[in-house]
Amino acid sequence: MAGDQPDRDRVDGDAAVGGRRRRGRGGRDRRRRLTRARVATTDALGGAATGQGAPAQAAAARRRRRLLGGSAGGLRRFVRELVGSVDDALVARLRGQIAAVRQGAQIAKQAAVGDSDHSELEQHMRAMERAGDDERAQLVQTLSTALMTSFDREDLFRVSRSIDDVLDNLYDFVREAGLFTVADEHCAMLLDAVEECLSRIDRAVGGIREPRDSVVAHALGASKDSARVRQRYQEALADLLAADTVTPELLKRRELLRRLDVVGLRLGEAAAALSDGAVKRG
């Protein structure tokens, strides 16, 4: 009997270990069920809070489980979607800011040819300036809270700041054109070049998530357009100073031309920031 004791002890020990294993598996199963229940409860409460229906809740739950599945692939997808959504928001804000400036350039052209009421044009220009400021404020807020962006945030901020300076100078141009009560066809020619440059910058911003070469090509085109603004300013100034006498009207026109020259310089800075950001992205 004594010789049988070790065998009984081993059997008893194996049974105890097996019981612990069974209990361990049971505990893990219970934890999984509790986790699923918590996820389902959270999804239901989140859907109720946001007013989503059952299909939208189910889709959101599947998206979260797919993104947070614990695998490296799921994490990469999560990062791509996170960065992509931030980039989309930044592009939307920048393009909204550019749209306000493009409308401002059209208003400035009306002021340059002198065929509209200046007080009304100034009111329209003030509205465009407020719209541009709102878009810029939202962009800065998005930049300050974003974890990461595919385009260097400092370069995006530089683009936005330069575009804001363009809008400010266009507003000053409209106001000064009304105060000076002069019209100048040379200013209208400069504003044509300004509009071409803004169109190029808008295309470059819209393609921020596209291959680098596309962004660089549009940015370089915008840089050439901004240089064309400067060239037209120099030509217009030469024609203006060819007069034998200096009159108050000549000085007024010179001030308006100089205002648009500054617009061209700020556009060149925006194009340079886009090129820098595209090169950094690689």
Image (tube, grey):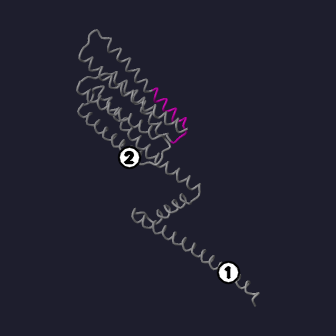
Residue at x 40%, y 24% (from the top left corner): 229
Residue 278 is situated, as x and y percent measured from the top left of the image, at 51, 36
Whole-angstrom CA distance, mark 2 to mark 1, is: 64 Å
Foreground pick, 257 / 69: 69
Mark 2 in CB contact with mark 1 (< 8 angstroms): no
Residue 60 is situated, as x and y percent measured from the top left of the image, at 48, 61
Name which quarter of the figure residue 157 lies in: top left
Residue 168 is situated, as x and y percent measured from the top left of the image, at 32, 33
Residue at x 30%, y 23% (from the top left corner): 256
Relative to residue 191, is residue 119 drawn left or right?
Answer: left
Quarter of the figure with the C terminus: top right
* Region of the chain picked out in magenta, as a range: 209-224
Of badges 2 and 1, nearer the viewer stands 1
According to the picture, the residue beneath numbered tag 1 turns out to be 13
Circle on res. 141:
2
Amino acid type shown at disc 1: Gly
Name which quarter of the figure residue 5 lies in: bottom right
Q: Does the magenta stretch include residue 212?
A: yes
Residue at x 52%, y 59% (from the top left corner): 63
Foreground pick, 78 / 154: 154
Foreground pick, 162 / 257: 162
Residue at x 57%, y 59% (from the top left corner): 70
Relative to residue 150, is residue 23 drawn left or right?
Answer: right
